[in-house]
Amino acid sequence: MRERLVAALVGTVLVAVTAMAVVRAYTFAGEIQRQARTGLDRSAAMATVAVDERVASGRTVTADFLDTLADGSVAITYRSPAGEQVTGGATVRPSDEEYAATRALAPGGTLTLVRPSADVHDQISAALLRIVVLALVLVALAVLAGWWLSRQLARPFQELAVVARGLARGRTDVHVPHYSVAEAEAIGTALRDGLARLDGLLDREREFAVSASHELRSPITALRLQVEGLGLHPDLPEDARADADDLLRGLDRLSAAVRDVLDVARIHRATEVPAVEAGSLVADAVRRATPRRARRRVEARVADNVLLRLPADALTDVVTALVTDSLHRGSGSVLVELADRGSHAELVVADEGARRCAPDVLRADAHPAELAPAVAAAAAFGARLVVADEPTHRYRLLLPRSAPDSP
């Protein structure tokens, strides 16, 4: 969503800026050409007056005189009444006739001024360059504004996605914040309502288990006592006594069945861990542990469809701690690799620095203090964290298919 927002905003600004730049370019080019022709007409009028005065005073029109009038910006050609031609000023080409002005002189003859078109084109190019630079600045500002706006708009939905993943993993203690964005607040309200209902269902399930344990076991126990008392009655016939014994055995089987069902339900609620896709958890941990400026240093090679019955949040925390340790205490690039070994999965977190401790299984009392929570969490769900016997530092996390004592 964030990329689409940026693309839409930048695309809109790009179209608007391009249209503005084209219009302004034609406007500036026309204005510069008009000013060039106007200036040329003004210069021709002034040069005509100067040449008329010189001819009227009986002096000769020379190339040096024309150079003085041209001031290096135009070319001036004087044609006398006798047909003699004198040229001075800038050098022009035949293609420069677009910017030419010819005036008749009072004593006779003509005076022609030509402005080099290259000067006009240079002015137009300079104006277009300013327009292009302005357009690029506007596009860059649009990209920055779109990036900032997209982050502000996407942040609530990213947080809601984290909440939804926690809910999918069976967590009901997640906190759903409130947002000023109406759509995000609507999703948050729905999640809060769903979590409240789920908590209510779990509470009623626990109450039912307690109630069922009392309501089922107590009558069965009372009935068994009554049958035992009946079987001990001295006047009871032998065939009825045999039926009473059969009834006691049936009540014992019923009591055992009820106890097993309630115990299994209790254990199932307390210890059930759903199967999780370990690859996505590892990828999330790498993104969480790696700052944007250092993300290029981490390479993730994650196998697909590695399903493990482990607590998702605990596994994510362990991987995050290992990647953070390699980034902060190691050197060079960091490799995070998840592989399926059949009976178990293996996660490798390695950097290019020298091995920082002896190769061995890390224990709670023999590891850097920064990794204490990770070692404890890994041990809690039956994983083993090992420092490999390699020249460079390498963590190997051996992950079981299921957590201890799971059904």
Image: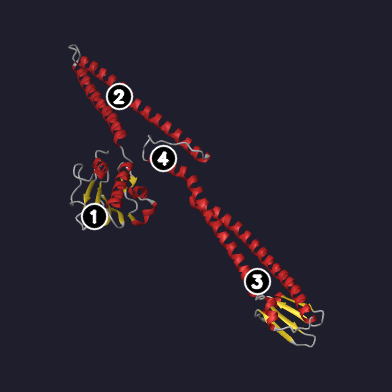
Between circles 4 and 2, the one closer to the viewer is 4
Among the two numbered marks 4 and 1 on one chain, the one whose residue lies closer to the N terminus: 4
Residue at the spot x=75%, y=88% of the render?
84
Q: Secondary structure at mark 2?
A: helix
Q: Tell me if mark 2 has few (under 14), some (14-19) or many (20+) residues whose alpha carbon lies within 10 angstroms of its own.
A: some
Cβ–Cβ under 8 Å for marks 1 and 3? no
Cβ–Cβ under 8 Å for marks 4 and 1? no
Q: Quadrant of residue 99?
A: bottom right
Between circles 1 and 3, the one closer to the viewer is 3
Residue 393: which numbered mark, if any? 1
Query: Is 267 drawn above or below residue 242 in the view shown?
Result: below
Between circles 2 and 1, the one closer to the viewer is 1
Q: Secondary structure at mark 1?
A: strand
Q: CA distance from mark 4 to mark 2?
A: 35 Å
On the rendered structure, is 46 left or right of 7?
right
Out of 36 and 198, give the one closest to the viewer. Answer: 36
The amino acid pointed to by label 4 is: Val
Residue at the spot x=76%, y=76% of the render?
48
Residue 120: which numbered mark, if any? 3
User: For mark 2, what is the residue?
Assistant: 213
Query: Is 156 drawn above or below residue 231 in the view shown?
Result: below
Among the two numbered marks 2 and 1 on one chain, the one whose residue lies closer to the N terminus: 2
Among the two numbered marks 1 and 3 on one chain, the one whose residue lies closer to the N terminus: 3
The amino acid pointed to by label 2 is: Ser
Between circles 4 and 3, the one closer to the viewer is 3
Query: Is 39 drawn above or below residue 193 in the view shown?
Result: below
The amino acid pointed to by label 1 is: His
Residue 17: which numbered mark, if any? none
